[in-house]
Amino acid sequence: MAETCDSNNKVIREYHHDASFMSRCDIFTDVTEYQPCLAYAGESGKGNFEPKWDTDNVTPHLIEQFKLNCAASNLPVKVFVSIGGDDPFKVAAGGADDWVLNATTTLHHMINEYHIDGIDVNYTTILCNQKLFVNCFKDLIRGLREALCTTGFVASLAPDAATYVVFQCFVDFEPRDPNRPVKSLVQHTYQN
């Protein structure tokens, strides 16, 4: 569950690999937005993303129907695809441009096909330096926004070990554990 910093906005994000989100439209009260996140789309280091969720049951038609059901229940909804998951983030030396091009192309197709509103970056293992990781995703997000011709497209970081330091830096502005400064968190996250 995720809640925005504004206490009047309550956003709930849940991760689903199957069609269980279909029954969620009517159970939330006092929620600003519900965000089911399809878990997950993976790739093997070349940026060619493929759905890893139950594609036999979670179809583009099902997501379209889900959005209609939520609209009928007056529940604002955005459907995300979580990218990464258990697949480690790795890019071959000199292959960052190819990774970005492939990722932009395959995710653009998936977003259009499945009526996706945004991506959730959720890598638990990052096998490259921080700058390469950040630049690949900066270029990917820019490419998706340009390809989709929309300002409504959303990209977010999942609260996991690899991104937790971001939440600490930008939400609290200081480490939660004063005995473990941000620098050591970054070293642990990206070098271990």
Image (tube, rainbow, N blue to C red):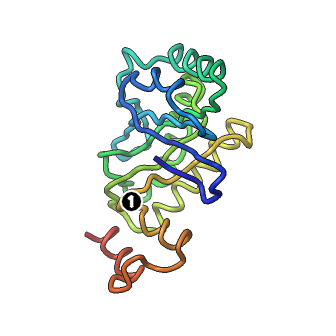
Front-lying residue, 36 or 124: 36
Residue drawn 34% across the image and 76% down it: 187
Residue type at mark 1 is Ala
Q: Is residue 175 above or below residue 162?
A: below
Left or right of 145 on screen, residue 175? left
- Residue 168, how many percent across, how many down? 47, 71
- Residue 169, how many percent across, how many down? 51, 73
Front-lying residue, 133 or 13: 13
Q: Secondary structure at mark 1?
A: loop
Residue drawn 38% across the image and 61% down it: 162
Q: Quadrant of the C terminus?
A: bottom left
Q: How many marks?
A: 1
Give the quadrant of residue 191. bottom left
Left or right of 88 on screen, residue 167? right
- Residue 140, how many percent across, how many down? 57, 49
User: What residue does disc 1 label?
Assistant: 93
Q: Is residue 173 above or below residue 162?
A: below
